[in-house]
Image (spheres, rainbow, N blue to C red):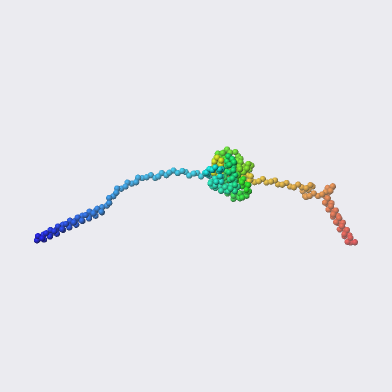
Amino acid sequence: MAQQSQTLSTLLLFSTLLFLSLHSSTFTSAQSSSTSASPPALSPAKSPPKPTSPPTPKPTAPPPAQGPAAMVPVQTSKGPLNVLKVLQKAGHFSNFIRLIKTTQEDIQFASQLNASDDGITVFAPTDGAFSAIIKAGVLNSLSDQEKIQLVQFHVIPRQISTPQFQTVSNPLKTLAGSGKRFQLNVTTSDSMVNVTSGLTNATVSGIVYADDKVAIYQVDKVLLPMEIFAPKALAPAPAPPKSLKGEGADGPAVPKDASGAALGCVVGWKNVVMVGAATVAAVALAFL
C-alpha cells in the first residue's frame, strides 16, 4: 500500500512537470508568433522636396545679320599679298580666278605691289556675275590680249578704302590703260557704291579684303570696257571711182570729128555703102 502511494506520487509529479513543460512551450511559441506577425516599424515620412524654380536661360547673342561678304582673314607674309589665295578662301569667285590664272595676271598684281607703295584695288565679279557673259559666249570670243585687258580693267593701281569712294576723283585709271575707253567712274549714294564703265553699272556688294596696300571689293557685274565691247564706228564708204575723160553717164564717150558728129556713125554708114555696092556688083556679074 505504501509502495503504490509512492508510485502515484511519482506519476503525479511527472505529470505536473510534463504539463508545465508543455505549457511553457506553447506560451513561447505564441509569443514568438505574435512578435513575427507584428508589422515592421514604419520609418518617419520624408518631408516633400522644396519646389525649385526653372533654370534661367542664358542670354544668347543675336544671329549675325545677312549682309555683304565678310572680310577674309589672311595670314600676313613677308612678300606681297597673294590675291588669288584671298579670292579662293572667300569662295564664289572661281570664274574670275580662272581668268586671272589663264592670263597670268596674278604675276602682274605681285609686280605692281612690289614696284609701288600705292597698292591696288580689285573689283572682283562673283560667279553669278560671270554666268551671264559666259552663257552668251562673250569670253570665248575674246582674243588673249582682250582677256588680259578685261582682267586689268578690274584693277585700280592704288588702294582705295571705303571712305575714299566719297571723295575719289573720276575717272579712275585702270591697269588696262590710260585711254578714256579703259576708265571707270565711281558714284556713291548713302551707303551704296556703284562702279560704271559706260556699258555696265556694277554695285559694290561687299568687302572681301582690305589693308593699307590692298583692297578687294565684291561686285555684282562684270565690268565691260568700252574699248573692247562698245560697237566700233563704221568706216566711211569708199568714194566711187572717177569716170574717164569724156565718159558720160551712159557709157564711154563716142569719138567725134571737128564738127562734133559721131565718127562711129560715119564709119558705120561708109561700111554699109561699101557692102551694098559690092553686093550690086556681084549680082550684075551673075546676070552677064
Point out residue 136 in the picture as x, y percentages from the top left corner: 60, 50
- Assign the C terminus to one quadrant of the image: bottom right
Point out residue 88 in the picture as x, y percentages from the top left corner: 54, 47
Residue furthest top in the image: 167
Q: Which residue is drawn at 63% across and 41% down?
A: 178
- Assign the N terminus to one quadrant of the image: bottom left
Q: Residue at x 59, y 45 (%)?
A: 107
- Camera-side residue: 87 or 232? 87
Q: Quadrant of residue 159?
A: top right
Point out residue 23 in the picture as x, y percentages from the top left corner: 19, 56
- Residue 167 against residue 141 in the figure, above or below: above
Left or right, 253 with reference to 222 = right
Point out residue 101 in the picture as x, y percentages from the top left corner: 58, 48
Q: Residue at x 22, y 54 (%)?
A: 31
Residue furthest bottom in the image: 287
Residue furthest left in the image: 1
Q: Quadrant of residue 283?
A: bottom right
- Camera-side residue: 194 or 179? 179
In this view of the protein, can residue 266 be seen by the observer?
yes
In this view of the protein, can residue 130 be seen by the observer?
no
Residue furthest right in the image: 288
- Camera-side residue: 155 or 81? 81
Counting labels gives 0
- Residue 22 against residue 90 in the figure, above or below: below
Q: Which residue is drawn at 61% across and 50% down?
A: 140
